[in-house]
Amino acid sequence: MSPITGKVVETPLGKLVLSEEAIATVAGAAAIECYGVVGMAGRKMTDGIAELLGRENLSRGVEVSIEGDHVFITLYIIVGYGVRISEVARMVVEKVRYTVEQVTGLKVANVKVNVEGIRIQRE
């Protein structure tokens, strides 16, 4: 069994290891709650189409790297048609930074948002 890698946090009760996948799941959950975000985009593109991922796969649309005491997050999102992309991206950055810092206690150094597609609702 391989050891879990991630950020080790010392607490009075012992050591806590926060994996990059756990941090990615928290970040993905925060991003999907933002107005205008309709889904997370998978990193593997098939025929140039970004697939929408369900809630159970939120970490797949997120890349996390930990360098020292800082966390760097890159999100790949799909937005709804008609929203102001710059505003959605700004809200995603703020919400993800706040949520990850509150839940994990780690300092988020950078959040990047990549809009991989726009979803048009058909009625």
Image (tube, helix red, strand yellow):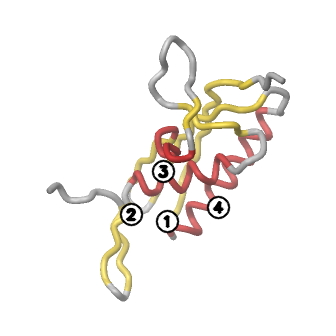
CB under 8 Å between discs 1 and 4: no
Cα distance in 3D space between marks 2 and 4: 17 Å
Task: Reply above or below: 47 against 84.
Answer: above
Count of numbered labels shown in the rendering? 4
Estimate how packed mark 1 is, as few (under 14), some (14 to 19) or many (20 or more) residues with alpha carbons within 10 Å: some
Q: Which element is circle 4 on?
A: helix
Cα distance in 3D space between marks 1 and 3: 13 Å
Cα distance in 3D space between marks 1 and 2: 10 Å
Three-letter code for the amino acid on which mark 1 is drawn: Leu
Estimate how packed mark 2 is, as few (under 14), some (14 to 19) or many (20 or more) residues with alpha carbons within 10 Å: some
Residue 27 in the image: x percent, y percent? Answer: 56, 52
Q: Residue at x 77, y 32 (%)?
A: 85
Residue 15 in the image: x percent, y percent? Answer: 31, 76
**Depth check, front residue: 72 or 114:** 114
Give the labeled residue for mark 2: 18
Q: Residue furthest left?
A: 1
Three-letter code for the amino acid on which mark 4 is drawn: Tyr
Label number found at residue 98: 4
Q: Residue at x 14, y 56 (%)?
A: 1
Q: Earlier in the sequence, mark 1 or mark 3?
A: 3
Question: Which is more foreground, mark 1 or mark 2?
Answer: 2
